[in-house]
Image (cartoon, rainbow, N blue to C red):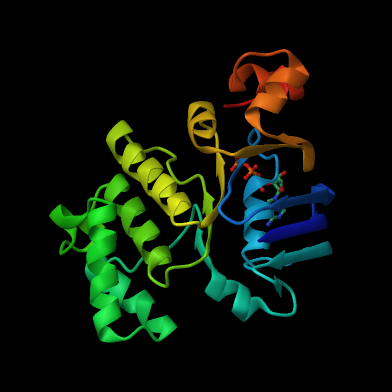
Amino acid sequence: MIKVENIQKKFYDKKSGDIYALDDISFDVNEGEIFGLLGPNGAGKTTLLRIISTIMGQTEGNITINGFNSKNQPEEVKKSIGFLSGNTKLYKKLTPVETMRFFGGFYNINKRVMNQRIEEILSSLDMHEFKDKIVEKLSTGQVQKTSIARCMMHDPKIYILDEPTLGLDILTSRTIVDFIKKEKENNKTIIFSTHYMEEADLLCDRIGLIHKGRLVEIGKLEELKEKTGKSNIRDIFLFYIDQESVVL
Ligand SMILES: Nc1ncnc2c1ncn2[C@@H]1O[C@H](COP(=O)(O)OP(=O)(O)OP(=O)(O)O)[C@@H](O)[C@H]1O
């Protein structure tokens, strides 16, 4: 469903010169799979997810999503994915329902399906209480739910979620974790990044560990436990990544 081949991303910075944010990253994510991307600050997770989502171009390499090439067929890729980015911007004066209607409008969804979809999403993300409040009056968690709702409107086959539960309380996180689980039951493919080890443990079919722009390990949690002799995901993470450089 997602095929990432030999992705390299080079940034140029006046002070530091060339920065290799991603170096020869390759992996596949299968249909119906939840794939978790773990790594310390600055590892390259956001850059990779932005490239997969066609928001940013790669320096080298190829990405195929739902059969479409991300460079040559970005519009088809965009229709196939729901991308939640850390800096998703919402219109402050719109309510969650208006936001969903607005973004749903980009996908030529008819009125009946649109209304049905809005109702489903409001229930699934537990948004009824604040659905008619304008975004600027919402809490952090409510804004995050609205951002997720926005990227669900076209019922994408694939979700790409950059730190979906970052900074959220336990109840809001649980709603989002439940949404991810439910979408998997619907055979959706999900790739997400997180700093929360327990969340990765709970949700992921497979995990990719990224460090300094390189994919240092990939596999099922059970396989990684066996390989490293460690009993939990936190120790596995630290096994692969130099403890001194980890800022969790
Ligand atoms: N536009 C840019 N110009 C120059 N360097 C960049 C740019 N965007 C990212 N980088 C660099 O690329 C590297 C990877 O950054 P990225 O944001 O992808 O990491 P991350 O794993 O998402 O980190 P975090 O967990 O802190 O969000 C970092 O060294 C960062 O400073």
Q: Nearer the viewer, residue 187 or 189?
A: 187
Horizontal side, residue 109 vs residue 44: left or right: left
Q: Quadrant of the C terminus?
A: top right
Please give the name of the residue rendered at 77% of the width and 20% of the height, measured from the top-left corner. 227
Position of the N terminus, as image quadrant, is: bottom right
245 shown above or below 92: above
Q: Front-most of 170 and 34?
A: 34
Question: Quarter of the image holding residue 60?
Answer: bottom right
In the rendered picture of this protein, how many numbered marks are placed on residues?
Answer: 0
Residue 195: percent from the left, percent from the top? 54, 33
Q: Is residue 94 visible?
A: no
Answer with the quarter of the image where residue 136 lies.
bottom left
Residue 20 pos. (x, y %): 82, 49
Quadrant in which residue 72 is drawn: bottom right
**Which residue is rendered at x = 82% and y = 57% of the image?**
5
Horizontal side of residue 187 vs 143, given as left or right: right
Residue at 26 percent of width and 68 percent of height: 118
Residue 115, image x and y in percent? Answer: 23, 75
Residue 84 point in image, percent of width and height? 48, 57
